[in-house]
Image (cartoon, rainbow, N blue to C red):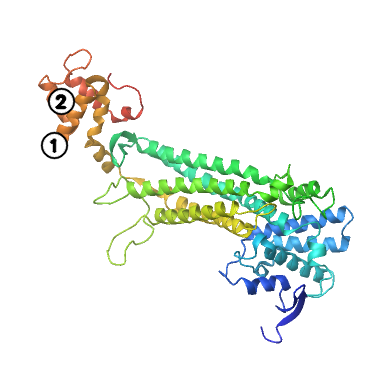
Amino acid sequence: MSETNFRIERDSLGEIKVPADALYGPQTQRAVENFPITGLMPYRAFVWSMALIKRAAAEVNRDVGLLDPKIANAIIQAGEEVMANKWASQFVVDPFQAGAGTSHNMNVNEVIANRATVLVGGALGQYTVNANDHVNMSQSTNDCIPTAIRLGCLWRLDELLGVVGNLAETLNGKAVEFDDVVKSGRTHLQDAVPVRLGQEFGGYARAVERDAERISRAAEGLRRLGIGGTATGTGLNAHHDYHPRMIKVLSKVSGLTLYESDNLFESMQSMADMADFSASMRTLAITLVRIANDLRLLSSGPSTGFDEIRLPAVQPGSSIMPGKVNPVLAEMLDMAMFHVIGLDTAVSLASQAGQLELNVMMPIIAHDLFEMMHVIIGAVKAFTDRCVAGIKVNRPKAEGWLARNTIVVTALNPIIGYSVGAALVKEALSRDLTVQEVALEKSAQGQLKHKDTGQPLTEAEIKSIFSDMRKLTDGGLVGG
């Protein structure tokens, strides 16, 4: 900073230079200088949530007679401006920073204090509205940060559930579209009894729906807020009505369904609700990796792979091999979900790292939860819109593989028995014939018999079993 583009501010450690036009103040500047780690800034969900808390606290403290109405109203206006993303560039503290999030909290306190000071006719750095005494009244970092984590996750919850729900709906649409396509099932990557392509996609859709239910269930735990516990859970320096009033105001302003904590100590000590929510997103990530990999496998080839489905061709696949097209959206989803799973691991480690009355690892818990949501929202939306919605079936290839699948002999098990069926498979594979062809040959020679009656199996019985492969996908006994 040159001599003309900074102002001198003071805190308990002494003087420090702050950019002249910055809304933040000395403690934020110290954090910028102390933690030049990644260049990352807080997610908007976090800034919005912190500003919401400051805005609500000003209203509550005004209404219980602790805060001058003029100052309170200025804080409320400044907080609402921050919530509307008006001063986004002023939130500059790296997520890898001082434990518990004091630097984050003071960044918000100072921005709102300076903006509120200007609103009441003061100048930047004058602090007519004080960052600690007014903006942070009845609060500490220790109850603000965990409350902000909860609110930020809830703020984007509907968006997250919306994109996940849209993926499930799109997969269900494909399940209906592909319901008449009978194909070879596969277990252990080996041939298995027939399934319908629609059944596979219906399974994917239901798995995603269940994961959305898990996320929604886990989010319920985030609705319990520990705001008002202040430094250790005792509520020291907060009005005795502060906690319940804050829940009401936060609910009113945000439109979110929120609840009072039944134990402020637990709400401040424990990150279990955050870990639970993180784990629900990890479970979704695991499901999405599985689905993406299945789509990559089913679309493999086209000349030397399964080639049962065709994914939309969205970009050339090689800088050297002309005409090559890759399953890039499925590959993207894999990588995005690997990242989410890694973030969940970090949240888990950070959640168990608290001691006694406080978890000092909250800044990275906050950042990683918001990043998980951000990555899932973007990745799932792109995967749904640019991949799943455009999937087409390659019916000749799917039905062609099924025609060569010897494991359809399983349908004969109730009639001829497992051992005879295994012998048919072995012979069909060795002679490069279909199992139906071998069975008809054995029947014509009188060598294929009912296991219970000893009666010869007729050609008509064999053809009846294999004439409609779809009925093999409906369960029950076939021809027995």
Placement of 54 over or under 94, stated as above or below = above
Looking at the image, can residue 23 be seen?
Answer: no
Residue count near mark 1 (Cα–Cα under 10 Å), binned few <14, some 14–19, many ≥20: few
- Say left or right for 381 vs 360: left
Placement of 32 over or under 210, stated as above or below = below
Placement of 252 over or under 74, stated as above or below = above
Work out whether mark 1 precedes mark 2 in sequence or the reverse, and give the earlier one: 1
Of the 4 image quadrants, the one containing the N terminus is bottom right
Q: Which mark is residue 177?
A: none
* Residue 326 position by quadrant: bottom left
Placement of 17 over or under 185, stated as above or below = below
Amino acid at pointer 2: Leu
Q: Which mark is residue 430?
A: 1
Q: Please tell me whether mark 1 sits on a helix, a strand or a loop.
A: helix
State the residue at coordinates (88%, 52%). Answer: 64
> What x and y, as percent, mark residue 105?
71, 62
Q: Please tell me whether mark 2 sits on a helix, a strand or a loop.
A: helix
State the residue at coordinates (21%, 27%). Answer: 421
State the residue at coordinates (81%, 67%). Answer: 130
> What x and y, as percent, mark residue 310?
34, 49
Near-viewer residue (192 or 95): 95
Amino acid at pointer 1: Ser
How many numbered dots are placed on residues in this image? 2
Q: Which residue is mark 2?
A: 440
- Say left or right for 221 vs 417: right
- Say left or right for 137 vs 292: right
> What x and y, as percent, mark residue 358?
68, 54
